[in-house]
Amino acid sequence: MSVKVIERVLNNSKCSSGSKPSSPILSLNYGWVVAFAGFFMHLALGTMYCWGTFTPYITSYLRKFDPSITYNDTILALLAAPAAQTIGFPIGGMIEQKLGPRITSLLGSWIMCLGVFLSAFATSVSSLVFFYGVIYGLGMGIAYMCPLKCGYRWMPKRKGIISGIVVTGFGLGGAAFNIVGATICNPENKTGTPYFEDDVASRVPTMLMILGGIYAVCTTLGAMVLVDPTESDIRELRLEASYGCGQREEPQDEEMQQPLKPKLHPSSPIDSSSLSSISGKPKGGMYETLMDPRAALLFAMMGLTTSSGLLVVGTYKTVGTSSGVSDQVLTLVGSLSLCFNGLGRILYGSLCDNIGFKTSLIIDFFSQFVIGLLFMMTTSMPVAFTVVVCLMVMNYGGNFSMYPTVTAEMFGTESVASNYGFVFAGFATSSILLKICK
């Protein structure tokens, strides 16, 4: 691999003085390439967060076919997506074990993009929920964990920052594509009262088809870079983790003399026993995880700590519109808040690596509690409303870097897709309960 050749050349030059690199970021571990490829993929996978901007357009369009449709009906698509994503996690995990991260990412991404493209032909709430909710969410779930899992194999001691970098794309994608979608549908910045007229609504099919094509390009480019470490790569990882670059002799301790498992090509099955000595974490399958009471606790925590953020993401634009805020301002608020979403993911991912999951989660939980109290109090004050939405979405986004990290730490990396699927189901359950209890 050309990147590995470059890595070894740079490492040799750095080690000529017998000193270690000043920062792990300066070491050209291919895991950094995987992390940023995953970031690029998640730019498209994270467009679920465009729903707050798109829902006025999509709902107005569907009202052409059924004038009784309201925002309370179309929000079902947003709620169906995480439920389908939960199903996609274990499916993606099983496929990835057989075909590797690249093929699995491509498959899941293309299913997601197909769902967005076919949504352009939806004329009812049920068809919208099926295409933009179920198909979209299923593909997203299949592809979601592939760059994370691949990055964990390359950098098993840096799971928090890997999670943070990858899922930051999930937040920032919504920020970018909010503006793209609004530019296509509402270039004149008209205001819905609360629904848009036909000149805006009629552009929805064009918007969805264009976005489906753009998402396909982003995810394909990112997925093509994903590749697991080879036998020689694993040996280098062991040496660097235990001795640093100043000492290149083969370690003699029992742990480092464990046999290496050849493999880890994208088209062959994954066996990570060769990585267990690096991470030092036990491996647990789905059954073992379900029998562990900590899994049920993570499930409940995921549902509770994401509920307030999900509510804000899904309703900020309709709440702002009803208070007289213009569509253009609300679109910018949405994009800015999703930048904070991305910031929260990398911030809390780094915090997990440095101060631990428990302390990070306590900070996140109490921040959301305070900010949530302020949400409805600031709707008539655009600047304060923007600040509150941004801070809430930042803390909300942090959950999605912390929970994959702690799942991999507790139950191992090889079944992390299936295991995190169970934890993530807490988020999906929360979204459904929010709708039922409304």
Image (tube, rainbow, N blue to C red):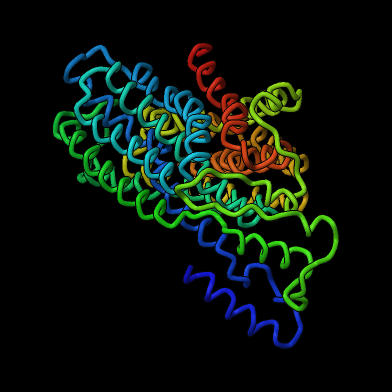
Residue that lies at the very extreme toward the right in this rendered image: 253
Camera-side residue: 344 or 378? Answer: 344
| 360 shown above or below 125 | below
| 172 shown above or below 78 | below
Q: Where is residue 8 in the image (x, y as percent from the top left)?
A: 59, 76
- Is residue 303 at least partly visible in the picture? yes
Q: Where is residue 258 in the image (x, y as percent from the top left)?
A: 76, 54
Camera-side residue: 260 or 226? Answer: 260
Residue pictured at 65% horizontal, 50% vertical: 159
Q: Which quadrant of the structure image shows residue 308?
A: top right
Q: Which quadrant of the structure image shows residue 62?
A: top left
Q: Which quadrant of the structure image shows residue 139?
A: top left
Residue pictured at 57% horizontal, 25% vertical: 425
Q: Is residue 33 left or right of residue 398?
A: left
- Is residue 307 at least partly visible in the picture? no
Residue pictured at 17% horizontal, 17% vertical: 65
Q: How many labels does the image show?
A: 0
Q: Is residue 418 left or right of residue 247?
A: left
Camera-side residue: 320 or 209? Answer: 209
Q: Position of residue 88 (x, y in %)?
A: 47, 29
Residue pictured at 31% horizontal, 38% vertical: 113
Q: Position of residue 231 (x, y in %)?
A: 61, 59
Camera-side residue: 135 or 426? Answer: 135
